Amino acid sequence: FVSDEFRMKPRTTQTTTTFTTTTIKNNSCFPHVRRKSLCRKSRSEETSSRRRRANNNNDDDFDDGNDDFVKALRDEASRGCSECYFPREKDRAENVFNACFPAFIRSKPFGTALLVGAETGEVVERFVSSCAAFEGEGAKLATVVDVSEKQLDRAMEKVPDVGISGNEKGAKYFQLSEMSLEEVKPYFGPFDAIVFNDTFEQFPEKKRKETLARAANLLKQITSSSSSSSSGSDEGGVNEATSRIVISSRETREGDESYARLKREELEALVKGLPLAWTEEEAKRGKALDLSSDSNIDNKSSSSNSNSNSNNNNSIGNNNVQNDDNDLDATRVLYLTENYKLAKPLHMRAKVVRGFGRGSAEMGLPTANLDPAEISLNWQKELNDDTVDVKNIPLGVYFGYCQLEGDESGKKIAVLNVGRRPSFVDKKNYENDVTVEVHCVEKNEDGLAFENGKKQFYGETMSVECLGFVRPEMKFNGLDELVTRIKTDVGLSKNSLMKMGI
C-alpha cells in the first residue's frame, strides 16, 4: 500500500503492549510498573505540580506547545483510568462517526480516515467495525497517528495494525515525532475525513492554522456537482458529500489545569484564509473573497446558520453536528471547499516586473512577477473603491489560467503565490511588502509554458483568472521543502481544474 517510510519511527518489536486490568473500585484502571499511584486525584496533582514547578522556574520545557510535555501528558493518560482521562469515549466515538458518515458513504466501500489521537481505540474501532458490518458504510482504512506510542499500543489492542502491504481492511498506526502533520505525507491519503480526537488544542498555538491547512490538503477532492444541482435532481446527492475535518474536544482535560478548549469564534478566526467552510452548502459554492477588507472570507452569517440548524448529534448522516461551546464534548465540522474553488473568479492584470530570480536559478520553477500596485489600481478603478488592495485577500496559493496579451498560443495554467515570502525574509519592508508570483504550466502538457520557462517577457502585460485557493502562505525550513510543497500545489491545482472541467 505504501513504502516502509510509512513508519518513520518504527517500533523495536512487532508485538503490542498488553494491558492487564485489575479490579479497583470502578474496574477501569490500568496498572503500570513503577507507577506511584493509580488514584485519579494523585495523578492530576502530580501533573499540576510539575506544571507549577516549571512556571515558577520560568521553564519552557513544560509549555503546552512543547512536544515533550504533550507526549508526557498523553503517555500519562494512557496509563491512567480510562473513565478519568477519556470520559464518554464511546459517546464521542459515535458523534465523530456520525459527523464523518456522509463522506464515508460517498466513497463506499473504500472510505478512508485520518485519526489524530489514538486514546483507547474506541473511535478507530467504530470506524472500522461499521465498514465491516454494514457493507462498507465506514472507513475501510483508518490511519491513526499520535505522539504517544503508549496510546497507539492501547488502540492496537482493539484494532490490530494491518501492516504496510496489501489493501486489507483495518487500521494503520504511525507515531509522530512532534505535534505536527508535516510527517503525514500525501501518499498516506487522500482521506474522506480527518479527525482531531481531542488533540487540536495540543498543537502549538502558532501552528494551528498551518495544521488545518495541511489537513485540508490531505482531503479528497470531489467531482463538481454543478450538473446534478442545475437539473434539480437529488440523485447521487449523498455521493457528493464533501470531505471534512472534524475537531472533537472535551470541555476539560484530566491532569491539565491550564487546558482551555477553543471557542467557536477562535476557530472561526483560524478558518479565515483557508479552503474550508462551516456548512456544506457554502463549501460547494466556493470560497468568497472581500477585496476591500482584511477580514474577508467566511461570512458570520454562515456561523449563525450552522448554529440555528443544529440538530441532535446522534442522527446518522447529520451534517449540522452540534457546535456548542458549553457542551461537555464539542464536535466541530469544517468542510473542504469543492475542488478548492473560489465563489467568484478573481481577475488580475498587470505588467511583468523583475523579481529576485530565485524561481529559475535556485528552484527550477520560473515565475512571472506581476506588479501588485498595478493590480490594486486596476481593481480600484473597476470597482470604484479606493480601499481595494491585493494585500486584503488571503495570502497564499491560488490557481487558474493566465495569458500574455498579444500571445496567440492561448491560455496557460497558472499557479500563483500572493504573499510576503516568509521563507526568504530579505527586505526591510517585509511585513508590508506583498508579491504576486505566477508559475505558468502548459494546459495540455506536463511541461512549463513559454519555451519551457526560458522566455523573458519583462514589461509585457499578463492577465490572470484565479479560480481556486489551495492553501495559506507557510514558512518552510529549507529550499528542498519549499520546492516539494510547490510541486504538490501544482499537482493539486491541475487536478482541481480537471475536476472542475474548466
Image (cartoon, rainbow, N blue to C red):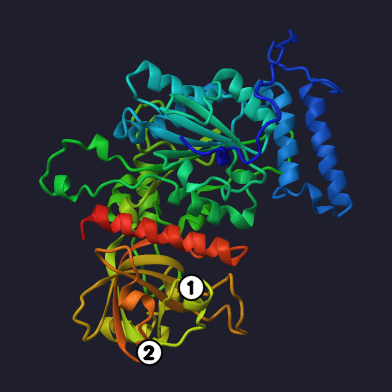
Q: CA distance from mark 2 to mark 1?
A: 20 Å
Vertical order, 233 against 433 (above or below): above
Q: Position of residue 297 (x, y in %)?
A: 39, 62
Residue 419 is labelled as 1
Q: Farthest residue in the top direction?
A: 23
Q: Residue at x 72, y 12 (%)?
A: 20
- Let me know if residue 360 appears in the view: yes
Q: Residue at x 69, y 28 (%)?
A: 150
Crowd band around label 1 with a 10 angstrom C-alpha radius: few (<14), some (14–19), many (20+): many
Asked whether 234 or 300 is in front, the reply is: 234
Q: Farthest residue in the bottom direction?
A: 459
Q: Which residue is mark 2?
A: 458
> Mark 1 belongs to which amino acid?
Gly
Residue 359 is labelled as none
Asked whether 329 or 193 is in front, the reply is: 193
| Quarter containing the N terminus | top left
Q: Residue at x 27, y 65 (%)?
A: 344
